[in-house]
Every structure is written in C-alpha cells, then in structure tokens.
Amino acid sequence: MDNHKPEQAKNDHGKPRPTLVPLEAIWALTAVRQYGVQKYHDPENWRKVEPQRYRDACYRHWLKYLDGERLDEDSGLPHLWHVLCNLAFLVALEWVDDLRWSKVARKLLGMEVQG
C-alpha cells in the first residue's frame, strides 16, 4: 500500500540538481584526478598551484586536442578530460578566492548563503 501523499512529498523545488551533470564528465574528472594523485602522491596538491599554471595546462591540452591529438602522451587519458580537470581546478580556486562570486553562485543554485 502506498502511503505517499502529495502534500508530504519532498519539497526540493529550486534546489541544486547535481544529477544534471553528465556522468561521463564526472568519470572523466575522476580518472584525471586519480592519475594526478598517483603521480603527485597528494590529493590536495592541486590547491598549492597558482591558477596561471592551470590556465597554461588547459591551453596546452586544448591546443593538442584541436590539432587532432586525442590522448595525452603522459597519462594516456584524453586531452579533453585534462581540459575539464584544469577548468574544475580554476573554478574551485576562484570559488574560494572570490567570495562575492561564490555567494552569487550559491544563491543561483538555491544553496544557503552565509555572511
């Protein structure tokens, strides 16, 4: 018997929906992160790198992709996956560094904004 009443349904209207992110992107990012952790032995090492280095790495991988090179020579993973990872690092670093932007993004996503 279904005791689920519409008025008791979870009210999640306006809340972030992370399941909208393609699983392929999550798996690609995970693969590059695992490669990086294996290479550098520190899952938080990326936070110690200045953003310009991620911009340069992103451009290098993007240019190789545009030149028709699919896989990175060192990791064996697709250049696009490395582009995604470098962009993710930049987004995360800017999210932390620019509190105003972070608050706006959180508000747009329907997340609680403090301060």
Image (cartoon, rainbow, N blue to C red):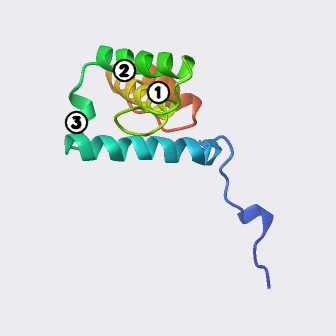
Residue at (79, 80) in percent of width and height: 2
Which tag, 2 or 3, sits closer to the chain's start?
Answer: 3
**Circle 3: is it few (<14), some (14-19), or many (20+) Cα within 10 Å?**
few
Q: Could you classify mark 1 by the number of other residues whose Cα lies within 10 Å: few (under 14), some (14-19), or many (20 or more)?
A: many
Image-based side of 8 in relation to 50, left or right: right
Do tag 2 and tag 3 residues touch (Cβ < 8 Å)? no
Sequence-wise, which precedes: disc 1 or disc 3? 3
Q: Is residue 17 above or below residue 6?
A: above
Residue at the outermost bottom position: 1
* Residue 51 figure quarter: top left
- Is tag 1's residue or tag 2's residue first in the polypeptide sequence? 2
- Residue 94 higher or lower than 45, as above or below: above
At 52% from the left edge and 38% from the top edge, which residue is drawn? 111
Task: Give the answer, above or below, for where 99 lies relative to 3.
Answer: above
From this viewpoint, is residue 18 visible?
no
Element assignment for label 3: helix
On the question of residue 49 being in view, the answer is yes
Q: Nearer the viewer, mark 2 or mark 3?
A: 2
Q: Residues within 10 Å of mark 2 (few under 14, many from 20)?
A: some
The alpha-carbon separation of the residues under discs 2 and 3 comes to: 15 Å
* Mark 1 lies on residue: 83
Label of residue 49 in the image: none
Q: Secondary structure at mark 2?
A: helix
Residue underneath mark 3: 45
User: Amino acid type of disc 3?
Assistant: Asn
Which amino acid, mark 1?
Val
Marks 1 and 2 close (CB-CB < 8 Å): no
x 25%, y 31%: residue: 47
Residue 41 figure quarter: top left
Residue 57 badge: 2
The label nearer to you, 1 versus 3, is 1
